[in-house]
Amino acid sequence: TLVITVPNDFSGLQLYLEEVGDISRRYWVNVPDHLNYFTYESLWSLVLEAGLSPLEVYADFPIEWFLANESSNYEKNSEVGKFAHAARVKLDSFITNQNDFALVKNFWSAFARIGQGRTVTLLARKSEIL
């Protein structure tokens, strides 16, 4: 089983926030450190092109949601970034530590499938096991 975790960059939410003016630049672009950028859809396609069978997909907390609020927009005001990050960690931990593991798995999987989450984690396996 292969487990891949990548930043969810050029997501629909990031592009929407850019379109409506909540962000002024594509802050996630970091050349030459990051040469490839993935979304849920492009990662799923890459795995299929590599001859693997995607099994499951998960996201984590979509910190970009804070960019939609003027008071927590860390791209416009870097001073609030540490507070957005602390809130993200707290909420992510709260959700993940619920007693019903199946519900938590479904929650994070649904987030990934609608393109939310700062990262996307995909589990895949060879299409044919030898």
Image (cartoon, helix red, strand yellow):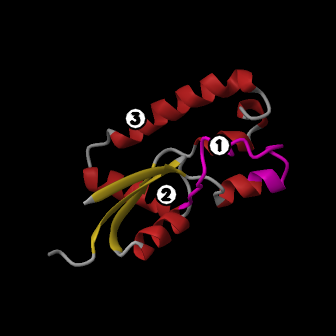
Q: Where is residue 116 shown, x and y percent of the image?
A: 56, 55
Task: Tell which of 15 and 114 is nearer to you.
Answer: 15
Residue 80 higher or lower than 3, as above or below: above
Query: Can you identify the residue that label 3 sits on?
Result: 93
Q: Where is residue 90 shown, x and y percent of the image?
A: 47, 30
Magenta stretch contains residue 38: yes
Left or right of 115 in this view: 53: left
User: Mark 3 falls on what kind of element?
Assistant: helix
The first of marks 3 and 1 along the sequence is 1
User: Mark 2 falls on what kind of element?
Assistant: helix
Query: Can you identify the residue that label 1 sits on?
Result: 32
The alpha-carbon separation of the residues under discs 3 and 1 comes to 32 Å
Residue pictured at 26% horizontal, 49% vertical = 100
Residue that lies at the very extreme toward the left in this rendered image: 130
Residue pictured at 83% horizontal, 53% vertical = 20
Residue 43 higher or lower than 49, as above or below: above
Left or right of 87 in this view: 16: right
Instruction: Residue type at mark 2: give it.
Output: Phe
Task: Tell which of 15 and 72 is nearer to you.
Answer: 15
Instruction: Residue type at mark 3: give it.
Output: Ser
Quadrant occupied by the N terminus: bottom left
* Residue 108 falls in image quadrant: bottom left
Magenta span: chief secondary structure: loop
The first of marks 3 and 2 along the sequence is 3
Residue pictured at 50% horizontal, 44% vertical = 61
Q: Where is residue 14 shown, x and y percent of the image?
A: 69, 52
Query: Can you identify the residue that label 2 sits on?
Result: 111
Magenta stretch contains residue 129: no
Q: Where is residue 41 shown, x and y percent of the image?
A: 53, 68
